[in-house]
Image: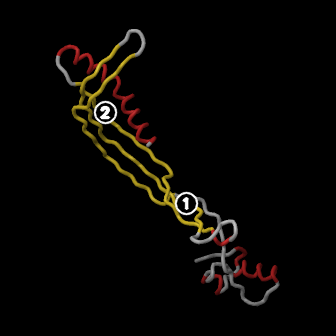
C-alpha cells in the first residue's frame, strides 16, 4: 500500500521498513559520508525531549457544605464598622485539574565528588506539577439570624457570592 515518488516499485527492504531504526536510504547516505562498506551500528542516539504531560488528574462534580461557618469583618476607616456572625455555605459543581510532567534532576552518585569525576553526576526522573486549574459554578451563601437585619444581610450576601467564589478559586489555585 505504500507508494514512492516517480512510480518506482519499492524494494523488499523498503517494504518491510527499517529494522534498526534507520531506513536503507539514510544508511546509504551515512555509508557514503563515512566511506564504510560494512554494516554500521549506532550505539546511542541522544535527543532532547521537552517535558510533556505525563499524568492528568481531573476531578469533577465536587460539592461542599459548610454549615455554621463563622465570619467577621472590620472596616478601619470612617464610618468604622465591625461585625461577626455565622453562615451556611454550599458550593456545587466544582472541578479541579492537575497536570503533571516528568522532568530530570541532577543527582550526584554516592561516594563520588562531582568536580573530580565526570561520571559522578547522573540524572533521576522527578514528577512535577506542571499546571493546575479550579472552577466552582454555584455558590449559595445564607447568613444565619432572624429579623429584618438578617434579611438585609442575606440580600447583601447574594451580591458577594460571585466575588466569594472567585476568591475561593484563586486561593485553591495558589496552593
- The residue depicted at 67 percent of the width and 80 percent of the height is 43
- The residue depicted at 31 percent of the width and 41 percent of the height is 93
Q: How many marks?
A: 2
Rate crowding at label 2 as few (under 14), some (14 to 19) or many (20 or more) other CA atoms within 10 Å.
some
Using the image, tell me which numbered label, if any, was put on residue 139.
Answer: 2
Q: Is residue 33 left or right of residue 172?
A: right
Q: Residue furthest top?
A: 79
User: Is 160 drawn above or below residue 175 in the view shown?
Assistant: above
Q: Residue furthest bottom?
A: 38
Dot 1 falls on a residue whose secondary structure is strand
User: Is 83 drawn above or below residue 57 in the view shown?
Assistant: above
Tell me residue 24's x, y (percent).
70, 82
Q: Which image quarter: residue 123?
A: bottom right
Dot 2 falls on a residue whose secondary structure is strand
- The residue depicted at 37 percent of the width and 11 percent of the height is 80
- The residue depicted at 81 percent of the width and 79 percent of the height is 33
64 and 95: which is toward the camera = 64
Residue under label 1, please give it: 103
Query: Mark 1 or mark 2, which has the lower sequence index?
Result: 1
Rate crowding at label 1 as few (under 14), some (14 to 19) or many (20 or more) other CA atoms within 10 Å.
some
Q: Is residue 85 left or right of residue 30?
A: left
Q: Which image quarter: residue 136?
A: top left
Q: Are marks 1 and 2 in contact (CB under 8 Å)?
A: no
Q: Nearer the viewer, mark 1 or mark 2?
A: 1
User: Is 56 drawn above or below residue 162 in the view shown?
Assistant: below
Amino acid at each position: 500500500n505504500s507508494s514512492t515518488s516517480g512510480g518506482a516499485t519499492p524494494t523488499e527492504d523498503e517494504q518491510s521498513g527499517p529494522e534498526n531504526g534507520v531506513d536503507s536510504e539514510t544508511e546509504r547516505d551515512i555509508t557514503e559520508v563515512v566511506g564504510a562498506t560494512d554494516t554500521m551500528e549506532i550505539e546511542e542516539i541522544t535527543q532532547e525531549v521537552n517535558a510533556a504531560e505525563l499524568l492528568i488528574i481531573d476531578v469533577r462534580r465536587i460539592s461542599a457544605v459548610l454549615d455554621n461557618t463563622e465570619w467577621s469583618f472590620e472596616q478601619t476607616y470612617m464610618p468604622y464598622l465591625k461585625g461577626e456572625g455565622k453562615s451556611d455555605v454550599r458550593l456545587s459543581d466544582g472541578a479541579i485539574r492537575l497536570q503533571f510532567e516528568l522532568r530530570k534532576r541532577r543527582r550526584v552518585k554516592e561516594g563520588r565528588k562531582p568536580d573530580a569525576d565526570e561520571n559522578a553526576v547522573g540524572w533521576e526522573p522527578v514528577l512535577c506539577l506542571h499546571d493546575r486549574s479550579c472552577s466552582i459554578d454555584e455558590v449559595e451563601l445564607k447568613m444565619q439570624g432572624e429579623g429584618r437585619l438578617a434579611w438585609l444581610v442575606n440580600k447583601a450576601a447574594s451580591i458577594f457570592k460571585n466575588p466569594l467564589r472567585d476568591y475561593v478559586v484563586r486561593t485553591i489555585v495558589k496552593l
